[in-house]
Image: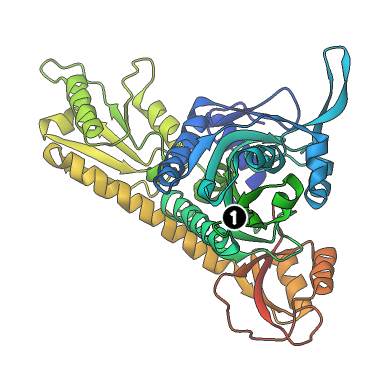
């Protein structure tokens, strides 16, 4: 990879290399010494903190609490829910010794936390008064990804949040699943400015051990789908395995119901890939660690105090709740700073030079369009807020337009194969709901049914695979 400071390849010409350069050169992340792992650098972590702040606020407002559970999980716990265990076996890292002593039982390094959490729930829950139990966890999980790795998108360890709740019945669990699904939609669309298709997974693609899985799927510029978040109704499978029972109001003992749900730092990868350009990142203002950077243009003439003027404006913006950085580093030229902050994707840049001072104005530059405008100092707060909203909206509209253009209808299997091979994106097709057709599509095209729409769409053809009567419209794609 080039050691030059800026991005040296075009996103359109080499998306993979472009992505890698943006991740490393913008200061988001670095490669770790162990293959498949990465170091999340301060700038990248600050984006994760913004995502976390949004979710944490809304989860706590709806009665959820944060907790923490052990990293190591006894193998016997995983085996209690056989379907769940078999689904994760190929990805599990195992601890087999402590120092020089061999352990009597292998310990899995957390691939997901259902089993270790539900072991505790079985001790905590006794009656209907203990329900619902609404707990969220911020942690990292490990799943062996050695061959095909990509920072944020596919790594052996990743940061995420996983929610695990316990309910008295299916209705309450269904409500939880859908409420979280909507919260994730708001995060992805309203904060990250990324449109998503919302719906359910097929039985073949659902989370192992779940009754059903709801999902949000987005499309990346290379024509591959990215699963942005999932929310699962686990039914009573884990309650049976871990004996999570409660005494109901009817004085009878009942099995509890569970939901689980999560999003990961994969969301940051989606932001990079979808919004970035040949100069680097473009951060949606609502999750940008730095929303505005102020760059003073040095001027040595006496009587023109650009530095104090820049500091005053920075303080005003900060006081108005805007995340602002004053870049007054003397060792770098303004041009160098412009390029660095564009690489980092800061939505708005404010320049203050001698002409601006004399006219009692500032020059404001949009990162997404490079448009420049002169704004009176008295209006700088209102105009900056308007511009941040405009950038947020423009990014979402641009991404929505790209999503619409990436959806192609297919009526026959030949149409499906042609679109997958030549155009990529989502293929909208009709399906008979038979698993055999789903398997054949995956085997012959590499595409899977990414989502069955939340709102049923009108069937417009026979099954795209077998030609028999179709029952559902689905969206298929190759995926990360």
Closer-to-camera residue (20/260): 260
- Count up the numbered dots: 1
Q: Is residue 405 left or right of residue 82?
A: left
Identify the residue shown where x is 23% and y is 34%.
317
Viewer can see residue 65: yes
Left or right, residue 94 beside residue 171: right
In this view, the residue in front, 130 or 68, is 130
Answer with left or right where residue 71 lies relative to residue 275. Answer: right
Residue 3 percent coordinates (x, y): 61, 26
The residue located at (16%, 17%) in the rendering is 301
**Is residue 54 positioned above or below 472 on the image?**
above
x, y percent for residue 237: 73, 54
Q: Is residue 85 left or right of residue 333?
A: right
Q: Quadrant of residue 76?
A: top right
Q: Residue furthest front?
A: 251
Answer whether residue 14 is visible to the viewer in this image.
Answer: no
The residue to which callout 1 is attached is 231
Q: Secondary structure at mark 1?
A: strand
Q: Residue at x 31, y 42 (%)?
A: 365
| Residue 429 picture location, percent across and down | 68, 76
Residue 467, horizontal then vertical, whole percent: 79, 85
Q: Quadrant of residue 40?
A: top right
Label 1 crowd (10 A; few <14 / some 14-19 / many >=20) = many
Compared to residue 271, the image places residue 456 above or below, namely below
Who is closer to the viewer here, 320 or 416? Answer: 320
């Amino acid at each position: 990879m080039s050691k030059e400071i800026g991005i040296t390849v075009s996103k359109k010409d080499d998306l993979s290399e472009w992505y890698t350069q943006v991740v490393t050169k913008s200061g988001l992340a670095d490669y770790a010494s162990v293959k498949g792992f990465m170091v999340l650098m301060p700038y990248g972590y600050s984006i994760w903190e913004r995502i976390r702040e949004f979710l944490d606020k809304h989860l706590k407002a709806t009665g959820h609490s944060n907790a923490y559970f052990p990293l190591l999980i006894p193998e016997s716990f995983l085996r209690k829910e056989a379907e769940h265990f078999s689904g994760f076996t190929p990805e599990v890292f195992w601890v087999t010794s402590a120092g020089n002593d061999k352990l009597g039982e292998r310990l899995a390094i957390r691939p997901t936390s259902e089993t270790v959490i539900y072991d505790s729930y079985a001790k905590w829950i006794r009656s209907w008064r203990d329900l619902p139990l609404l707990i969220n966890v911020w942690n990292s999980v490990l799943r062996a990804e050695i061959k095909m790795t990509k920072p944020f998108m596919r790594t052996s360890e990743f940061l995420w949040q996983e929610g695990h709740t316990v309910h008295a019945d299916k209705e309450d669990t269904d409500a939880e699943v859908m409420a979280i699904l909507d919260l994730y939609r708001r995060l992805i669309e309203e904060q990250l400015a990324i449109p998503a298709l919302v719906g359910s997974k097929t039985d073949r693609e659902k989370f192992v051990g779940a009754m059903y899985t709801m999902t949000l799927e987005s499309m990346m510029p290379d024509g591959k789908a990215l699963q942005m978040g999932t929310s699962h109704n686990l039914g009573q499978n884990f309650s049976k395995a871990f004996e999570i029972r409660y005494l109901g109001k009817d004085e009878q003992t009942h099995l509890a119901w569970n939901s689980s749900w999560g999003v990961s730092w994969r969301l940051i990868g989606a932001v990079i890939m979808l919004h970035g350009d040949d100069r680097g990142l473009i951060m949606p203002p609502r999750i940008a660690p730095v929303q505005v950077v102020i760059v003073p243009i040095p001027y040595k003439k006496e009587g023109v105090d650009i530095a104090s003027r820049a500091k005053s404006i920075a303080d005003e913006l900060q006081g108005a709740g805007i995340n602002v950085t004053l870049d007054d580093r003397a060792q770098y030229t303004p041009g160098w700073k412009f390029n660095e902050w564009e690489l980092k994707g800061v939505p708005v840049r404010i320049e203050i030079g001698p002409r601006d001072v004399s006219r009692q104005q500032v020059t404001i530059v949009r990162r997404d369009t490079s448009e420049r405008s002169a704004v009176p100092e008295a209006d700088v707060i209102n105009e900056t807020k308007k511009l941040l909203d405009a950038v947020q909206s423009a990014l979402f509209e641009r991404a929505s337009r790209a999503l619409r253009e990436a959806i192609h209808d297919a009526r026959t299997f030949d149409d499906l194969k042609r679109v997958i091979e030549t155009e990529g994106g989502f293929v909208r097709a009709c399906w008979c709901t038979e698993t055999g057709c789903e398997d054949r599509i995956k085997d012959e095209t590499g595409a899977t049914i990414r989502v069955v729409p939340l709102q049923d769409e009108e069937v417009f053809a026979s099954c795209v695979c077998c030609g028999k009567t179709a029952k559902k419209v689905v969206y298929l794609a190759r995926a990360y």
